Amino acid sequence: MGVEKTDATAYHTSKGKFSDVSDHDGESIKAPPRYALQRKLENRHIAMISIGGVIGTGLFVGTADSLMYGGPIGLLLGYMVMGTIVYCVMITLGEMVAFLPIPGGHIKLAERFVDPAFSFTLGWNYWYSWMISSPSEIAAAALLINYWNDTVNNSVWVIMCFVVVLTINMLGTGAYGEAEFIFASIKVLTITGLIILGIIIDLGGGPNHDRIGFRYWKNPGPFVQYNGIEGVKGRFLGWWAVLTQAAFSFIGTEIVAIAAGEAKNPRHTLPKAIRRVYVRILLFYIGGTLVIGLLVPSNNPLLQLNSGTAQSPFVIAIETAGIKSLPSIVNACLLTSAWSAASSDLYTASRAVYGLAASGNASKYFLKTTRHGLPYVAVLFSASFSLLAFMAVSTSAGSVFNWLANMSSVAGLMSWFGISVTYLRFYKGLQVQGIDRKTLPYYTNLQPYAAWWGVISTVTICFFSGWSVFLKGEWNTANFVTNYLLFITWPIMYVGARFYYRIKPVAAKDMDFKSDLAEIVADSYDEPLPKNKIEAFWQWLL
């Protein structure tokens, strides 16, 4: 006998206000703060944050190592495979947060649809991935500044970047949204311009009129024989080496879930942002890596990030083409990209720890906010870890970037794993409780297969992420620790939390699809119709 389908919009009760803290038994614990997060992010903010908010040094700088290890085809295929994972995770996440855009995002949703222990593990892992991403971006910024002057101690650049990032976040959500709108616009224009310029250079339109074509796909070749290993095995290992770095470039696509709790009209803006994810993947990442593989040979010594003289592949290509002054302009744009990404990292880390506190998995003091809705305790706490970027002072900035990027990649992949598992439980709960997915603000026909691809692929990549240290004579303790620390601690944290909470996973029939819906529906409204063609274009674009 089939289950009668219910309209999700009508499936709510009067319990409509956001709970500050949960005691994991459905009761609300009185929270200490007088104020709470406020919905200040407008449609254009969410649109630009989702499209370009976290396009950062992973794409502009990290692709140097990926091209060196995988070759142009290995680089392109690596990003294409990772792109499928990202798309599946985003449509998976989008269905949940468009329905329940609450503070804490998927961290709070994991508590509702899996169990408190899973929320604890996912939340702290997610916070860690962003906490470690911010110093990696700052270290990369120091690496970019070294292009102009490598005689100044890196600590100067680290302090400068840290102050910029902290200031943006301490000015509040509205200021962060405006800053990201500007920075993300610069990044979108930069990557689009670089792709167009790259095509022109490849076709011989540069000052040296050298028509490159697919020259570097022939010599030194489409793939790199990793570590000198011959045959298909060496080429496969070169391609696999790209995946972890590619993950670092894509990490942050899910930032809209955390921003959902501070977004205006979330049921309209979030589905719109989710639907545009494929544009970012195809145009910026696939297009960008294709152009990089055409313009720079995989054996160029400047691609070695550990060398201390490394450059962005885009800058290398422009310099090789003989274009004067432009490399410095592009490098400056990439520097703003690093600042922007670091700012987004800190924003997300602070909201993640706020979400943990809201779930009862962190100190209630992280819930303290100003009257304008700034969770200042969470921001300052997360910002303190950005000082890890000072590791770039005593060690090569490129090496520090690689270490932090490895840790961020694995933590990010495990967060995607957690999101996918949460969705599978969400999907099961909808089925058991007879809620029709077609009535949700956003849904796709690819589920639950997309979520299963997210679960399987992320765990597989994490398990083999540090394989290179097991090659003969290639043991590297730093690489082993940065690749496997987070992967190993995930099950330890979950098992430990299960013993601590002593609460069984939430049964599908008991899942809470009701709380907060009344307020969410009340905050929803129809966007005003455009008055002219210019407004219509702007509304379509954003």
Image (cartoon, grey):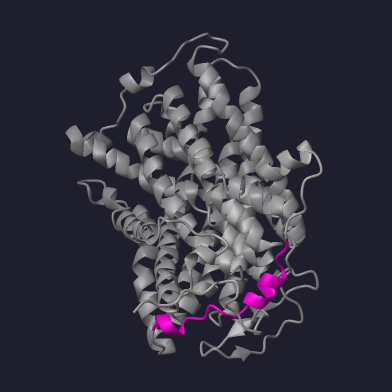
* Quadrant housing residue 196: top right
Residue closest to the eye, 206 or 448 = 448
Q: How many discs appear? A: 0
Q: Point out the image quarter for the N terminus.
A: bottom left
* Quadrant housing residue 522: bottom right
| Image location of residue 184, percent across then percent down | 66, 44
534 part of magenta stretch? no
At horizontal 62% and vertical 54% (from top left) the residue drawn is 344
At horizontal 31% and vertical 19% (from top left) the residue drawn is 218
Residue range corresponding to the magenta coloring: 505-525
| Image location of residue 443, percent across then percent down | 50, 59
At horizontal 56% and vertical 15% (from top left) the residue drawn is 322
Residue 147 is at least partly visible in this image: no
View extreme (top): residue: 209
| Image location of residue 115, percent across then percent down | 44, 80
In the picture shown, does residue 92 fall above or below 519? above
508 part of magenta stretch? yes
In the picture shown, does residue 332 fall above or below 526? above
At horizontal 50% and vertical 44% (from top left) the residue drawn is 278
View extreme (front): residue: 1
